Amino acid sequence: MGLFKLFTQDIAIDLGTANTLIIHNDKVVVDAPSIVAIDRASNKIIASGHEARQMHGKTHENIKTVRPLKDGVIADFNASEHMIREFIKSVPGLRSKWMAPSLRMVICIPSGITEVEKRAVRDSAEHAGAKEVYLIHEPMAAAIGIGVDVQEPKGNMIIDIGGGTTEIAVLALGGIVSDKSIKVAGDVFTNDISFYMRNQHNLYIGERTAEQIKIEVGSALDELEVPPDELAVQGRDLLTGKPKQVMVTYKEIARALDKSITRIEEAIMEALSMTPPELAADIYNSGIYLAGGGSMLRGLDKRISLKTELPVYVAEDPLRAVVRGTGIALKNLDKFNFLMR
């Protein structure tokens, strides 16, 4: 058994639609965009992660960029397998090994995932070199990462807003009591912004520019105590075809995102309506926890709080809450018996 442990390396993976994070030896060693660049002629993958992200939206006809995950699940099996393999190769602690170690992985998955989609995640991990694969639901991993004791007989509500999905779950006794998974999250926000810029300003912008707008001036409320400055946005004028610049305010982006955020609010209310009364009482006292990159949208916590009339808390490092929780679960495999093999 000791010899087996010597040649086994544990890694925790948050395989996200927008970003993939890997923990090895209690450290986040990979934090890269979930994207690959493929040569159309040979069908070979020529770049992944940050390098492929630099190419996104700027490629010629011989190169295409692909995001292997869509709505939190694997959409392109070969590309995802290669991406996982490349990210694992870049882990410093594994790169220096003279012999390829056996890998034990814990990978987080959306709570609304199907058996077929689970199989795709497992197969991708096994083809990338994993000997043991465990799966954990994203809301559970987020709760553990935030520091919530998920195994006590107390209800906790977690909302994880990622790139592809928003995962809403009520947890108690190490399990998910009620949950709601919707395909409205960071990517939909980005598309909303692109659509708004085309309709209101006749400006055609790329995905990367829309993402930048979301980060720089994105807001869930049209009245903020500390508003961000106006942002200069460049793109192509749809009427003249010329490059053009317009100034955008956070109030405009709040209007652009309103419908999508309303859908998230409705899903939260639906999850609350399915919650048993004893757990609802716990949530009334403890409030709602937000994690994931989408939770960083300005004013979102306040808007959800106004809708639910409950206190809402954003995790300290929301982008890494899920992978942190996945890493803790990996270190305590015996304790967290809800992990799926």
Image: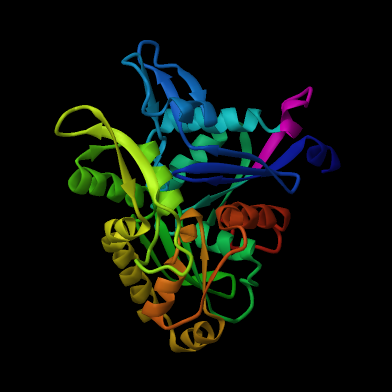
Q: Residue at x 21, y 43 (%)?
A: 198
The colour scheme applied to this rendered structure is rainbow
Residue at far top of view? 41
**Residue 99 shown in magenta:** yes
Residue at far left of view? 239
Number of numbered discs = 0
Q: Quadrant of residue 333?
A: bottom right
Q: Residue at x 42, y 80 (%)?
A: 275
In the rendered view, would you say 327 is above or below 105? below
- Relative placement, left or right, of 338 versus 304 is right
The magenta stretch is: 92-104
Closer to the camera, 285 or 104? 285
Closer to the camera, 244 or 8? 244
- Report x, y in % for residue 211: 40, 44
**Residue 156 shown in magenta:** no
- Report x, y in % for residue 10: 71, 43
- Report x, y in % for residue 91: 68, 33
- Report x, y in % for residue 323: 60, 51
- Relative placement, left or right, of 339 versus 304 is right
Can you say which quadrant of the picture contains the N terminus?
top right
- Relative placement, left or right, of 94 versus 160 is right
In the rendered view, would you say 39 is above or below 85? above
Residue 128 can be seen, yes or no: no
In the rendered view, would you say 326 is above or below 301? above
Residue 180 can be seen, yes or no: yes
Q: Quadrant of residue 89?
A: top right
